[in-house]
Image (cartoon, rainbow, N blue to C red):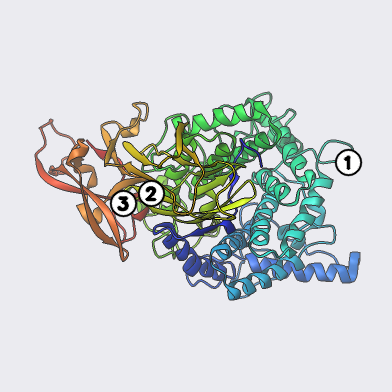
Amino acid sequence: MNKTNPTPLNLRKVKVEDPFWKGEMELVRKEVIPYQWNAINDRVEGAEPSWAMRNFKLAGKITAKRKELGKAYAEKIWPTNIFQVLPEDKEHLEDRFYGFLFQDTDFSKWIEAVGYSLTQHPDPELEKTADEAIDIVCAAQQPNGYLDTYYIINDMSKIFTNLKDHHELYCLGHLLEGAVAYYEATGKDKLLNAARRFADFVYEKFGKGEGKINGYPGHEIAEMALVRLYETTGDGRYLELSRYFIDERGTRPYYFDKEHPEEAKRHGDREWYHYYQAHKPVREQDEATGHAVRATYLYSGMADIARLTGDESLKKACERLWDNIVNKKMYITGGIGATHLGEAFSFNYDLPNDTAYSETCAAIGLVFFARRMLSMDVDSRYADVMERSLYNTVLAGMAMDGKSFFYVNPLEVRPEACHKDERKFHVKPVRQKWFGCACCPPNIARTVSSVAAYAYAENEDTLFMHLYLGGKVEKAYNGKTVIWNVDSDVLNSGKLRITCDSVSEGICTANQTIAVRIPDWCTGYSLECGDKKHELRKGYEYVTGDFMQGDSIEITFEHKVRILSSASAVVENAGKVAVSYGPFVYCIEEKDNGKDLHLLSVATDPGLAKLKKIDIAGQEITAISLPGFREKATSNELYKDFETPEKESTEVTFVPYYTWNNRGEGEMRVWVNR
């Protein structure tokens, strides 16, 4: 740890007591984690099966048989499908792999969420279940360390022959993330050791030199996961492998051409593989392209390597890509990925509302990227986006009861269009119980359970508060421990109080610093810190002094209803405005405003806004009302001479975007006529 690069605070050093996030974390602990365990064991009635644990159990039997019989035991080689393998008869399953190629990650993300949850709420029964699941997973591992059920069940001779499409390194990445999280929470290293053995096997197989595979992942995440493994174990091979994957990506001749010669014939000398962010070397990339989740996972790994190695060219590439995303390709809700074609970024400023893809996982990927940019440069512009994505798109991906989920997060919905228009079939007007490709629900669980690691970071002399997460936070300054008590009512009154709860061995001998972000939604703030010094740098108030027990910092953030517009280049939003309050983006729903939301228009004076409390899913939610008009519907004559439409005055009610569709199916809009 050094004085310039902060790292996320260990979750065991934070006791979350925040009134908002504690509720979300408890929802994940009590509802989502048990629900997901049932889902990955195919026990949720009416939901698509996961097959994940079934595949691991079958792979374990095959591994045991191979160890017993060696080469005398022949694999059952089944026809494979790179998208999804489904049983022909669900009542009579065969001993074969089912599900998507990356189905193993359903377990990996579940165990990661379990690890984070255990840091805040020890649960012997949950830990026992997790240990039993780990036993099943580890039993499938091959003697050489390989651990991917798709090939273990099908044909081990084909491993690493289709990096572009077959997700082995993606599965490795999620396994590493889950193993580290569980180890950090419990101290148990069985899964960590298995994950390391898989990583060691990959390290021996990949790189430059005779007999080595000089490829890289088709779906990124191994890059940042290997860095995490390196920081946990201190083994430099994992950092080396991560950097190799990043350095090699996009170089010519394209590695994916070697695997798929037909692709080389198609593209000739043209740039290719934009979908995989492999069209040119990463240091030369300046526009976010292709699959949005893959992209943000890659950029996160790039930022990690730039931070740890001091690679300035890689840092500059991260900054260019960040600026392109947040200034030209990000929805107001913090969602990214405008098109369902390839779950991908579109061209600059193309941000359609009703066909938006805005995958939940992509918003989570942007949160990952933001946190890593903060670790290189503590600048509030990164935390502002991290907050926007978390409070809006990420939370919208999960129902308020934790039992259904959105994969796609549109900014405008007409249920009839979702049901009848093939161009919008990807947009669901209600959350789903589960998905065959179930990346989003467990991604939400692991992110919400670890939110404290996004709220707080530290370096040698400073505690950084990126998000206003209430609770107790432990920070060591020069060998002495300070417990900070954080009382946060920022979402309501705007008040934040940070108190020095205790100091080991009395007062610290050197100054203590706490840096608090001033958010972009704040219209002004007051700061009281007694005789302590304070300085505003890059959107953070750095408060420094010798704190004794009972000393406190008090900040009050002014936040009012904001009426927002978008750049004129975003043609879909011409003549429209959006409403926000604090970190929350708001929307209008049919439940409050009736049908035909496109006929509503609202006043653009935020001074006319009124706050009110309404009940959504049993919770008291702050809603906003604005005066407006409803245009009276005309006749059904398709075209006619223009006449000034009749309008009637009305009050338009807005609710936080994350709460939408918790009261049944209906229309929804974020952008409203002005």
Q: CA distance from mark 3 to mark 1?
A: 61 Å
- Give x and y (percent) for residue 368: 55, 44
In the image, what residue occupies the spot 58% across and 45% down? Answer: 458
Task: Please tell me which of labels 3 and 1 falls first in the chain.
Answer: 1
- The residues tagged by marks 1 and 2 sit, at their Cα atoms, a distance apart of 58 Å
- Residue occupying image coordinates x 37% and y 40%: 527
Q: Which mark is residue 211?
A: 1
Q: Is residue 15 visible?
A: yes
Q: Secondary structure at mark 1?
A: loop
Is residue 665 positioned above or below 128 on the image? Answer: above
Mark 1 or 2: the one toward you: 2
Q: Judge by depth and name the residue closer to the eye, 386 or 548.
A: 548
Secondary structure found at label 3: loop
Amino acid at the residue labelled 2 = Leu
- Return the residue at label 3: 492
What is the quadrant of the C terminus in the image?
top left
Horizontal relation, residue 217 to residue 590: left or right: right
Q: Secondary structure at mark 2?
A: strand
Where is mark 2, residue-wise? 496
Q: Nearer the viewer, residue 213 or 655?
A: 655
